Amino acid sequence: MKLEEIAKKYSDPDHAPLGVGQPSRILSPEERQHLRDDLQIAIGRNRSGFIVIVSLIVILFLLNTAIVVTHLEEPATIQAATAALGVSAAGLITWMVRLWSEKSRLEILAVFAVNLEGESLTTLLNVLASSSHAEA
């Protein structure tokens, strides 16, 4: 589950994102615990994905090195392999940066979910949920 999905799940869509107007609903202790649990699950998934991506980048690097070493007399093969593996690595690095950004945002929200209470937490979730609508 992504940050935006978590924020939507626990936000109060009937109220303005900055708490203008009627008071927002306040999350019960059980809802706050579920929020923390959902955040920890999402953080764990992102961590696992990040490890997989780093592993794939290392494998691509080793594969590229092996191709260069075994095909020293074939510069066209080295050039083609390096180009193909470089494009793959660039895509993986882009994905890795997105996961890292999401992981950081989830961890910040996890800290807020522990330390904020009442309307402050709901207002934060409302802002996050409404910002995901603006980005879409």
Image (cartoon, helix red, strand yellow):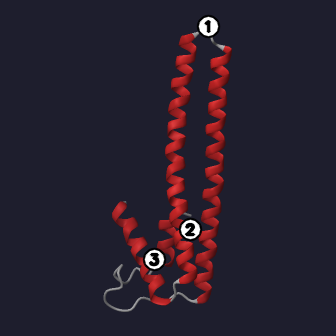
Residue 123 higher or lower than 66, as above or below: below
Q: Quadrant of residue 43?
A: bottom right
Q: Residue at x 65, y 47 (%)?
A: 52
The amino acid at mark 2 is: Glu
The amino acid at mark 1 is: Glu
Q: Position of residue 118 (x, y in %)?
A: 49, 89
Discs 3, 1 touching: Cβ within 8 Å:
no
Question: Local crowd at mark 1 within 10 Å, few (<14), some, or many (≥20)?
Answer: few
Residue 17 higher or lower than 72, as above or below: below
Residue 129 circle label: none
Residue beneath disc 1: 73
Residue beneath disc 3: 125
Separation of residues labelled 2 and 3 (CA atoms): 14 Å
| Label located before the other in sequence (3 or 1) | 1
User: Mark 3, mark 1: which one is toward the viewer?
Assistant: 1
Q: At numbered mark 3, what does the secondary structure look like: helix, strand or loop?
A: helix
Q: Residue at x 62, y 81 (%)?
A: 33
Residue placed furthest toward the bottom: 22
Q: Position of residue 105 (x, y in %)?
A: 50, 65
Residue 107 circle label: 2
Q: Quadrant of residue 71?
A: top right
User: Mark 2, mark 3: which one is toward the viewer?
Assistant: 2
Residue placed furthest toward the top: 73
Separation of residues labelled 2 and 1 (CA atoms): 50 Å
Q: Residue at x 61, y 76 (%)?
A: 36
